[in-house]
Image (cartoon, rainbow, N blue to C red):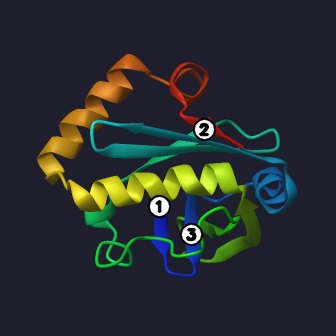
Amino acid sequence: MQLRLTPDGCELALFYPSPTAAEVHEIRGGLPQWAWVELDGIAVLAFRFGTLQRADTPYQVTRDETARDQSGPIDPEGKHLIVSVVLVDAHTGIIKGLRALTWPPEFATAVRDTVQRQLDSPITDAQAGIALQALYDLYPDTASLVRERADVRA
């Protein structure tokens, strides 16, 4: 999974090995749930579509070529932020689903603020790896991460 923040919004790429019809259906039309976690210079986006299991992906602006030379998503403050979800068959590279969603203003603002903090005080990949491992040691599954540590949810 990969989260990219661009001047036009966000892109969440989901790489599923041979996605089932049920997975394609839920990602294309299931109710999305989002959670954002920020800690020690790193961030994690947790998400769920419909009945699928929760999943997460870390985010570090210095690893995102589309965002690190800017301020990440540049939509005006207090506005929704467009999120493009792309489901890719990891075995074939074929796109199995596309979906456009929005994050509500409170969620989008939390993401923008994290990006700005990461731009203002970047950390190294080694520091990010240590912080991420510490986070996953405390919260070994996405459900506990969301339940016990989410900064904002949508």
Residue drawn 34% across the image and 69% down it: 64
Q: Distance from label 3 to label 2 (Cα)?
A: 17 Å
Q: Nearer the viewer, mark 1 or mark 3?
A: 3
Q: Distance from label 1 to label 3 (Cα)?
A: 10 Å
Q: Is residue 65 above or below residue 15?
A: below
Q: Is residue 22 above or below residue 138?
A: below
Q: What is the number of callouts on the image?
A: 3
Q: Earlier in the sequence, mark 1 or mark 3?
A: 1
Say which residue label 1 marks.
2
Label 1 element class? strand
Among the 4 quarters of the image, the one containing residue 108: bottom right
Type of amino acid at the residue the image marks with label 3 = Cys
Q: Nearer the viewer, mark 1 or mark 2?
A: 2
Type of amino acid at the residue the image marks with label 2 = Val
Say which residue label 2 marks.
152
Q: Earlier in the sequence, mark 3 or mark 2?
A: 3
- What percent of the width, then of the height, locates residue 136? 37, 27
Residue 139 shown left or right of residue 119 in the figure: right
- What percent of the width, then of the height, locates residue 132? 30, 36
Label 3 element class? strand
Label 2 element class? strand
Residue drawn 76% across the image and 57% down it: 27
Say which residue label 3 marks.
10
